[in-house]
C-alpha cells in the first residue's frame, strides 16, 4: 500500500534524475572556458577514423564544444582505413589515422577540398605502447628488440632462455613456457608494435608491419582483452597502450646501451626526433618514426596518429571550423586534456609549433 | 454435384475477415522477402571477395577459400563440441523435471533454466574470460601432461585457458536452456497410456523412460539439438571475447592456437575493415548463412526419416 502511494513518484524522480544527469555526459571533461564568450564559430564538423584516438577525441570534442557552444563535432571510430576512405570521398571534414596517407591516396582527388588542392597529415596523438608482463617473482624486465621479436615470433619459448637471462642477470627467471599475448582484432597498436620489431630487429622479424599479428600465439580481443589475459595468466607477456597497462609491470626497452622505461616524455621525444617522410609536400608532417634510435632519452615503441585535413576546403566555413578544432587539439591545452583523459604523451613544443604553422595556412 | 455447387452459400466477406487474412498473408510473405533480401545483399556484397587480389588477405593466405576454410572448421568444431556437452545434460535436466522431480520443484527448476536463456551473450563472454578460463587452465595443463599423446589433447597448454574447449563450455551453457525447454515439453507429451503400460509390465522407472519416453521424444530431441546448434554456430560476442584465435585448421583443444569461428572473426575484424576487407568479411557471413541452412535442412531430413518409428504420429 505504502509502496503504491510513494513508489510511483519515487520511480519518476529516480528516472528523471538519471535522465537529466546523463544529458551533459559528453561535455564532462570541460577545461577552463576562457574563450567561451569570444567564440563566434557555429556549425557541424564530422570526422572519422582511428579508434585508438577515440577516447582522446571525445575529450577534445567535450573541451572544444564547451568553449564554442555553437559547434557540434562528431567523431566516428570506424578505423584508420575507413576514416581515410570517408575523408577522400568527401563524407567527412577530417580524418584520424594511425598511418599517414599513402602516395596513391595523395595522388588522387579529395572531395571535401578545393579543386586541385591536397590534404596533409598532422601528428596530433602520441601514445606509448608498453610491453606488459606477469611472471611470478619478476618485477623488472629488460628487453631488446631482437629478444622481443624472437619471443613474439615463437623462436624463444622459455623464460630462462639464454637471451633473456643475458639481459636480466639479476632476475630469477622461471623455466616455464612464455605465453605471448597479441591482439586478436586488427589494430594500429599491432601495426606499430610489428613495425618497431621489423625495423629495430630485422634479422629476427622478417614480417612487414600490419594490423593483423602475423604469428600464432595467444590472442585476445582489444587492449582490455590483452591486459586481462596478461593479468589473469601466469608467465605472460603482451603489448598494450601504456595508458591501459594499469598495475601490470612493464618492461624496459634497450635503446643504445641503456634500458628505457616508457614515459610520456620519452615517447614524445622520439616523435620529435624523427625525420619527416621524404618526397612529400613541405607542409605534410608525416613522420618516419625513428624506431632504431640510440638516444636513451627516447622510447621508440610509440603509436602516432594523424589528423588529416585539407590545405584548402571547398567550403571556407568548414575550413574555419576544422582549423579551429585541430588548432585546439594540437595546442598545449588540448594535449593536456587528452593526457588526463586518455593517457597520451603530449607533443613537444617544437612539434606543436610545427603543426600550428601548417594549420595557419589551412583555409 | 452440380446442384451442390450451385447451392453453395457464399460466405459474406466481413471487413475483419479480409483484414485478418491479408495480414497473415503479408506476414507470411514478409518472412520470405526478408530472407531473400538478406541472401541477395550477402551475395552481391560478397562477389568482390571471391576475386580479391592475394594481397588483400593477411599473412600467407592468397585466396578467399583458404581464408574461410579454417573459419568454417572452427565454427562447426566448436558448435559440435558444445552440443556434445549440452545435449546429455539437457536431456537429464528435462527428464528430471518431467518425470522425477516433485511438481513444485519441477516448476521452479523449469523457470530457472529458462532464465539462463535471458542472460546476454556478452555476460557469458565476461564470465568466460573472468571466471571460467582461469578456473580450467590448471586442468588443461594436467590433461596435456597426462594425455598429450592423444592428438586433441596435445600441448603446449594455453597459459590463459582461453581455448576452443573453454569456448565450447561457454556455448554449451548458452544452448542448454533452449534444448532443455524443448525436451521437457516433448517428454511431458508422452502418452500416459504408454508409460502406464510399461510400468504395468513391470518396468522400472528408468526402463519405462527408455521404452516409452525416449523413443517418443527422439525427433523432438533432435530438433531441439539442431536449434541449439543453430545458436552455437552463430554465437558471436562470447566467442570473440574468449577465444585466442589463429588462422589455421587446428584439432588441438587446449592450446593457445585455435581455429576461429566465422561470426567471431567478423566481430573482431569489422571495426577496422575497409575496402575489399569488408566484402571478404561479408562473404564469410554468406558462408555461415549457407552452413546454417545446410544444418537446418539436415535436421529436417533426420526428423522426417525418424517420424515413422516414433509414437508422434
Image (cartoon, coloured by chain):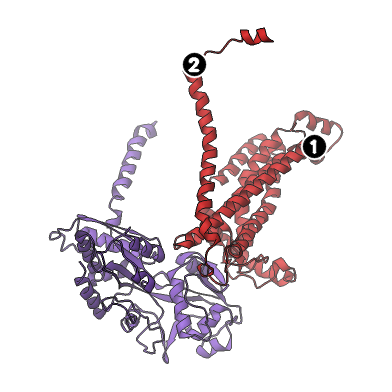
Dot 2 surroundings within 10 Å: few (below 14), some, or many (20 or more)?
Answer: few
Please state the horizontal and vertical placement of residue A352, each as a whole percent of the image.
Answer: 24, 76
Which one of the lettered chains is coloured red?
B
Nearest the eye: A160 or A93: A93
Residue carrying label 1: B309
Residue at image location 63% in from the left, 40% down from the top? B181
Indicate the position of residue B127 as horizontal and vertical percent values: 54, 57
In the rendered structure, are the residues bearing label 2 and label 1 in contact, judged by CB atoms less than 8 Å apart?
no
Q: Which residue is mark 2?
A: B14
Q: Chain of mark 1?
A: B
Asked if badge 2 and badge 1 are on a common chain, one would say yes
Name above or below for residue B89 compared with residue A351.
above
Q: Colour of chain A?
A: purple
Residue in the picture at 73% in, 43% down = B302
Q: Which of the 4 image quarters holds residue B185? A: top right
Asked whether the viewer can see residue B174, the reply is: no
Instruction: Work out whether residue A358 or residue A237 is closer to the camera in this orientation and state it.
Output: A358
Q: Chain of mark 2?
A: B
Amino acid at each position: 500500500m505504502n509502496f503504491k502511494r510513494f513508489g510511483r513518484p519515487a520511480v519518476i524522480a529516480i528516472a528523471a534524475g538519471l535522465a537529466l544527469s546523463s544529458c551533459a555526459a559528453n561535455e564532462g571533461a570541460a577545461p577552463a572556458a576562457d574563450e567561451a564568450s569570444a567564440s563566434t564559430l557555429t556549425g557541424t564538423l564530422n570526422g572519422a577514423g582511428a579508434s585508438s584516438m577515440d577516447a582522446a577525441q571525445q575529450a577534445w570534442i567535450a573541451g572544444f564544444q564547451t568553449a564554442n557552444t555553437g559547434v557540434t563535432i562528431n567523431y566516428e571510430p570506424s578505423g584508420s582505413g575507413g576514416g581515410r576512405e570517408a575523408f577522400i570521398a568527401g563524407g567527412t571534414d577530417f580524418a584520424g589515422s594511425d598511418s599517414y596517407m599513402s602516395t596513391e591516396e595523395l595522388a588522387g582527388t579529395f572531395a571535401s577540398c578545393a579543386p586541385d588542392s591536397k590534404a596533409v597529415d598532422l601528428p596530433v596523438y602520441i601514445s606509448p605502447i608498453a610491453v606488459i608482463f606477469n611472471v611470478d617473482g619478476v618485477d623488472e624486465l629488460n628487453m631488446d628488440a631482437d629478444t622481443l621479436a624472437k619471443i613474439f615470433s615463437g623462436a624463444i619459448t622459455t623464460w630462462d632462455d639464454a637471451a633473456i637471462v643475458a639481459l636480466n642477470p639479476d632476475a630469477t627467471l622461471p623455466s616455464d613456457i612464455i605465453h605471448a599475448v597479441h591482439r586478436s582484432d586488427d589494430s594500429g597498436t599491432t601495426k606499430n608494435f610489428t613495425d618497431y620489431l621489423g625495423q629495430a630487429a630485422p634479422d629476427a622479424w622478417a614480417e612487414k608491419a600490419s594490423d593483423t599479428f602475423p604469428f600464432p600465439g595467444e590472442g585476445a580481443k582489444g587492449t582490455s582483452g590483452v591486459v586481462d589475459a596478461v593479468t589473469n595468466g601466469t608467465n605472460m607477456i603482451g603489448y598494450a597502450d601504456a595508458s591501459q597497462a594499469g598495475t601490470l609491470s612493464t618492461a624496459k626497452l634497450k635503446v643504445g646501451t641503456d634500458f628505457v622505461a616508457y614515459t610520456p616524455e620519452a615517447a614524445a621525444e622520439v616523435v620529435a626526433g624523427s625525420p619527416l617522410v621524404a618526397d612529400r609536400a613541405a607542409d605534410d608532417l608525416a613522420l618516419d618514426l625513428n624506431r632504431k634510435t640510440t638516444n636513451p632519452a627516447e622510447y621508440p615503441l610509440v603509436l602516432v596518429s594523424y589528423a588529416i585535413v585539407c590545405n584548402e576546403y571547398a567550403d571556407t566555413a568548414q575550413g574555419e571550423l576544422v582549423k579551429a578544432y585541430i588548432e585546439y587539439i594540437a595546442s598545449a591545452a588540448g594535449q593536456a586534456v587528452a593526457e588526463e583523459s586518455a593517457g597520451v604523451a603530449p607533443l613537444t613544443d617544437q612539434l606543436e609549433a610545427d603543426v600550428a604553422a601548417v594549420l595557419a595556412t589551412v583555409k | 454435384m452440380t446442384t451442390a455447387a450451385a447451392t453453395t452459400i457464399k460466405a459474406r466477406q466481413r471487413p475483419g475477415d479480409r483484414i485478418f487474412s491479408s495480414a497473415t498473408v503479408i506476414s507470411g510473405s514478409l518472412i520470405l522477402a526478408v530472407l531473400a533480401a538478406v541472401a541477395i545483399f550477402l551475395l552481391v556484397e560478397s562477389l568482390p571477395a571471391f576475386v580479391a587480389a592475394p594481397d588483400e588477405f593477411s599473412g600467407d593466405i592468397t585466396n578467399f577459400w583458404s581464408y574461410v576454410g579454417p573459419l568454417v572448421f572452427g565454427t562447426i568444431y566448436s558448435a559440435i563440441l558444445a552440443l556434445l556437452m549440452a545435449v546429455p545434460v539437457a536431456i537429464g535436466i528435462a527428464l528430471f523435471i518431467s518425470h522425477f522431480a516433485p511438481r513444485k520443484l519441477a516448476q521452479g527448476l523449469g523457470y530457472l533454466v529458462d532464465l539462463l536463456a535471458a542472460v546476454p551473450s556478452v555476460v557469458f563472454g565476461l564470465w568466460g574470460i573472468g571466471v571460467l578460463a582461469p578456473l580450467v587452465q590448471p586442468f588443461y595443463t594436467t590433461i596435456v601432461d597426462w594425455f598429450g599423446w592423444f592428438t586433441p589433447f596435445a600441448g603446449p597448454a594455453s597459459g590463459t585457458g582461453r581455448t576452443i574447449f573453454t569456448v565450447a563450455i561457454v556455448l554449451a551453457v548458452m544452448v542448454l536452456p533452449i534444448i532443455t525447454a524443448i525436451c521437457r515439453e516433448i517428454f511431458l507429451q508422452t502418452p500416459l497410456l504408454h508409460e502406464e503400460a510399461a510400468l504395468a509390465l513391470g518396468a522400472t522407472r528408468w526402463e519405462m523412460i527408455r521404452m516409452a519416453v525416449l523413443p517418443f521424444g527422439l525427433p523432438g530431441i533432435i530438433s531441439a539439438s539442431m536449434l541449439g546448434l543453430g545458436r552455437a554456430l552463430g554465437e558471436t560476442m562470447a566467442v570473440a571475447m574468449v577465444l585466442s584465435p589463429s588462422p589455421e585448421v587446428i584439432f588441438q583443444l587446449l592450446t593457445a592456437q585455435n581455429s576461429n569461428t566465422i561470426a567471431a572473426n567478423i566481430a573482431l575484424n569489422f571495426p577496422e575493415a575497409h575496402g575489399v576487407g569488408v566484402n571478404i568479411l561479408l562473404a564469410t557471413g554468406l558462408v555461415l548463412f549457407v552452413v546454417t541452412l545446410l544444418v537446418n535442412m539436415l535436421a529436417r531430413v533426420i526428423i522426417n526419416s525418424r517420424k515413422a518409428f516414433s509414437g508422434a504420429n
